[in-house]
Image (cartoon, rainbow, N blue to C red):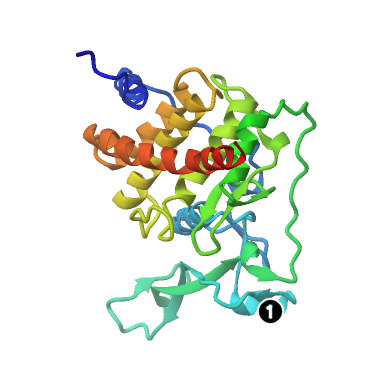
């Protein structure tokens, strides 16, 4: 007896083939502005340096902060702004010099004859997105023609009841607020291998796939730190589900190289464990079914 054709397995196999054949660097399919700038101190205007750049970039990306401006709790108060209750700071490191008597052999010689010991101090800073009373400047998006929306796909998205906020320069799902953030339509420029329309819907479906993984829905394990193993596996699930949904909903006819590029970077974190994509695909199928069930139930109720 001929076995039933498995669309999801076929797509997964194509993704694996694309990864094994080698894929290029993944690029965000929308115009990004402040989020890609060097983080700066909102009070002094000076750019952060060294490991602090990486720490602040990673925090901004994982939590969806819109601004590249940071400051301590006290510095925000001095600017007339207030850090919102419950917001957590991001640690940074800065170095100070402890001046000591010249007889201490552990000190470092200063060119002027002084002797001092450098020591590291930790501080906690908050992004401008975490405070009230401070206006975040959002660079204007370039003018471009909007792509055509797909009514059938919009109905599927709306049927989920997920709260989606459009605007800003990041796409993310915030599990604390249970809300999704997506850049507005005209921010999407697409890539060399996808249209702006494809990129727009694929991005929403990716974040919806994170949304259904919440504890009150499919209750998937979430990574506690940016780019750890659990975080990487969750990204594999969400992007694979986005691929399945794009094909199921007729947004694209087959997986685009963009999907393989995105997935490949997280397989690297998982030490190139090719089996991980198959495990992620199983969870992605469950997420796909969960999302599509909302609109199917609406159709059945209306029949």
Q: Residue at x 73, y 74 (%)?
A: 79
Q: In screen coordinates, is 154 left or right of 98? A: right
Q: Quadrant of the C terminus?
A: top right
Residue 220 in the image, given as x and y percentages of width and height: 35, 53
Mark 1: few/some/many CA within 10 Å (<14, 14-19, 20+): some
Name the residue nearer the viewer: 181 or 70. Answer: 181
Which residue is identified by label 1?
77
Give the answer, above or below, for where 141 lies relative to 103: above
Residue 98 placement (x, y as % from top left): 42, 80
Query: In the figure, 113 relative to 273: above or below?
Result: below
Q: Residue at x 63, y 54 (%)?
A: 66
Q: Residue furthest front?
A: 303
Which of the 4 image quarters holds residue 12? top left
Instruction: Answer with the quarter of the image where residue 128 lies.
Output: bottom right
Seen as rendered, the residue at the extreme left is 1
Work out whether residue 30 can be spotted.
Answer: no
Residue lying furthest top in this view?
Answer: 2
Q: Secondary structure at mark 1?
A: helix
Q: Going by the image, does 137 lie left or right of 71?
A: right
């Amino acid at each position: 007896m001929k076995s039933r054709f498995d669309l999801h397995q076929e797509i997964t196999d194509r993704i694996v083939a694309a990864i094994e054949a080698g894929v290029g660097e993944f690029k965000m399919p929308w115009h990004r502005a402040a989020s890609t700038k060097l983080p700066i101190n909102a009070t002094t205007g000076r750019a952060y340096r060294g490991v602090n750049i990486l720490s602040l970039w990673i925090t901004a990306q994982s939590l969806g902060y819109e601004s590249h401006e940071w400051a301590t709790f006290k510095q925000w108060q001095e600017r007339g702004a207030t850090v919102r209750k419950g917001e957590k700071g991001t640690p940074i490191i800065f170095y100070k010099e402890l001046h000591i008597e010249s007889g201490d052999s552990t000190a470092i010689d200063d060119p002027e004859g002084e002797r001092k010991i450098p020591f590291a101090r930790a501080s906690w800073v908050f992004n401008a997105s975490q405070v009230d009373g401070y206006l975040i400047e959002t660079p204007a998006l370039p003018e471009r023609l909007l792509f055509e929306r797909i009514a059938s796909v919009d109905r599927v998205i709306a049927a989920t009841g997920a709260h989606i906020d459009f605007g800003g320069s990041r796409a993310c799902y915030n599990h604390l607020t249970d809300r999704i953030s997506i850049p507005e339509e005209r921010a999407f420029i697409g890539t060399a291998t996808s249209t702006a329309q494809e990129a727009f819907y694929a991005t929403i479906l990716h974040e919806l796939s994170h949304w259904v993984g919440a504890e009150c829905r499919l209750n998937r394990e979430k990574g506690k730190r940016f780019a750890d193993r659990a975080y990487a596996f969750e990204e594999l699930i969400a992007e694979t589900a986005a691929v399945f949904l794009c094909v199921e909903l007729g947004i694209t006819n087959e997986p685009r190289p963009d999907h393989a590029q995105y997935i490949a970077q997280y397989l690297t974190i998982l030490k190139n464990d090719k089996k991980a994509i198959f495990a992620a695909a199983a969870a992605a199928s469950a997420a796909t079914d969960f999302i599509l069930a909302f609109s199917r139930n609406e159709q059945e109720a209306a029949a």
